[in-house]
Amino acid sequence: MVKTKLSKKEIALSALTCLLCHLGLLFVLFLMVVINTEGDFVPLMHDNVANLITVVVASTVLSIVVYFFFLVENKALLANYKKMIEIYFLLYIALLFANVFGKYVSPTARPLLFYPLMICMILRRREAIFLNSVYMLLLFVFNRYLNSTDIVGGTVQMIESFSSLLTIFCGGIVGIFLLKSVKTRLGCVLVGLVLFIPTVVINLVMQLPFVTAESWFDILENIIFSVFDCTLSVLLFMCILPVVEGLFAELTAFRLRELTSDNAKLMAKLKKHALGTYNHVVVVAQLAEACASAIGEDAELARAVAYYHDVGKLKNPEMFAENQNEYDLHKELTPELSVDIIRSHTKEGAKLIKKNRLPDIFADVAVQHHGTMPIKYFYAKALKLSDGELNVANYSYAGPTPTTKIAAIVMIADASEAAARSLSDRSPEKVAALVGSIVEERMNQEQFIDCDITMRELTLVTRTCINQLAGVYHSRVKYPKLTLSRK
């Protein structure tokens, strides 16, 4: 759900987190001064007190702007203290990389596009562009007041300051827009090739006022280092992204693909010990992906969480119908015991997901995909064995109900796929009636009141599930009973 209001405690903790992150930023800026002066920073600090104050004040203002931007635009992110730490952590790395390569290689060779490439993988495009602008201004202020790379021939020419400003702004925005649609590592390399164009053009244009007939070698050097800037930015991005994915449990497109491969730890176990469940989640994942795409949700994320929604069945795989052969073990159990075993798979799945350090949304969907729906088969069985009325809550899942659109999608896809398998007649009309009744039943049971999915979106999800299931369970021509003789 979209967070519209922060509690006083969340505001205080988010402000404290941002303050600590800002103090870390000031320490990084100090390290950059130390690197530039090769340890002899006391004279610089003594002679440039006003410049130091300017950098400290400017960086403080930028941190305050970041806080209030998220307070207005994305309160959920601001309340996610781990995410704020990650944003600043990447900023620290980007600044240090830029400073080290600027000092020991060339100011033009700095990997200036590393930060926008990283940040666009963990945030939406709007937030990524904003933080790219903050990074651009922060580096510009540091270059202007505390970096000696702008001093050429004893005079301050501001070439590198403005070059980095324009490179980060133009190249960063191009990278953010291109990388958002990239789903493969090779695509990242191609983005790096495209970034050559704005980076080389900007650096050449900034050098034009100082070009002479004898400076052709400087122009060539400038082009080489501009290409080096883009190449290094992409290489660092590809090397550090897996580390960030592991440290902060980030769900990038690459990480989602890895989690849904047959070699992923829980998927391999599911395929080995609960093959029927594995086949079920594969189809549910296809349904969830199509439904999420239809309503504008993250299709890759929906597909991944659908793969893991039933991993709790690994505890007792033989107790679930899709993993049984001919004999039903529940025939030996009371309905109450059967219900306890069946509904436990949601909580067991969440525990298993957390144990394997997977993101919280996977665990949330695992416990929410059945909501508080009754387990009708065993409730009906219990009614037959009892003389009076029974409390349906004792034969229902514990919940909670879905709190996100993706959880609602998985709920509908899971129930629709399981029910469609049991149909003897899987004609489009029968499938359509079945899926429609499933969605209507969950609406009547108030399963969607805690998520912000609309009636229009539910209609789109229903139609998409019908179309997808009709394709999965399509009719086939019966093969003739004919035996061919051996040649």
Image: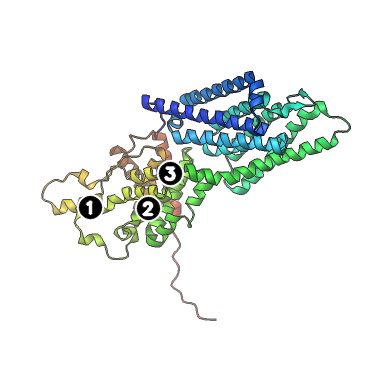
- How crowded pointer 2 is (Cα within 10 Å; few <14, some 14-19, many 20+) is rated as many
User: How packed is label 3: few (under 14 Cα within 10 Å), some, or many (20 or more)?
Assistant: some
The secondary structure type at the circle numbered 3 is loop
Left or right placement of residue 75 versus residue 160 in this view: left
Identify the amino acid type marked 2.
Val
For the view shown, which residue lies furthest in the left direction? 387
Q: Amino acid at mark 1?
A: Phe
Q: Position of residue 54 (x, y in %)?
A: 61, 20
In the rendered view, would you say 198 is above or below 145? below
State the residue at coordinates (35%, 39%). 402
Write down the quadrant of residue 16 in the picture.
top left
Q: Going 24% across and 59% down the picture, which residue do you hit?
A: 330
Q: Are marks 1 and 3 in contact (CB under 8 Å)?
A: no
Q: In the rendered view, does 202 fall on the left or right side of 368?
A: right
The residue lying furthest to the top in this view is 50
Q: Amino acid at mark 3?
A: Pro
Q: Residue at x 76, y 40 (%)?
A: 224
Quote the CA–CA distance across marks 2 and 1: 22 Å
Q: Position of residue 373 (x, y in %)?
A: 28, 44
Q: In the image, which disc is placed on residue 311?
A: 2
Residue 104 in percent (x, y) is at 70, 38
Query: Which disc number belongs to residue 359?
Result: 3
Give the label, 2 or 1, closer to the camera: 2
Question: Picture coordinates of residue 19 (x, y %)?
Answer: 48, 26
Which of pointers 2 and 1 lies earlier in the amino acid sequence?
2
At 67% from the left and 34% from the top, the residue drawn is: 38
| Residue matched to label 1 | 378
Residue 423 seen in this snapshot: no
Between residue 203 and residue 129, name the one nearer to us: 203
Horizontal arrangement in the rendering, residue 296 relative to residue 424 (left or right): right
Q: Please, what secondary structure does the residue beneath circle 1 have? A: helix
Q: Would you call the spot at circle 1 few (<14 residues within 10 Å), some (14-19), or many (20 or more)?
A: many
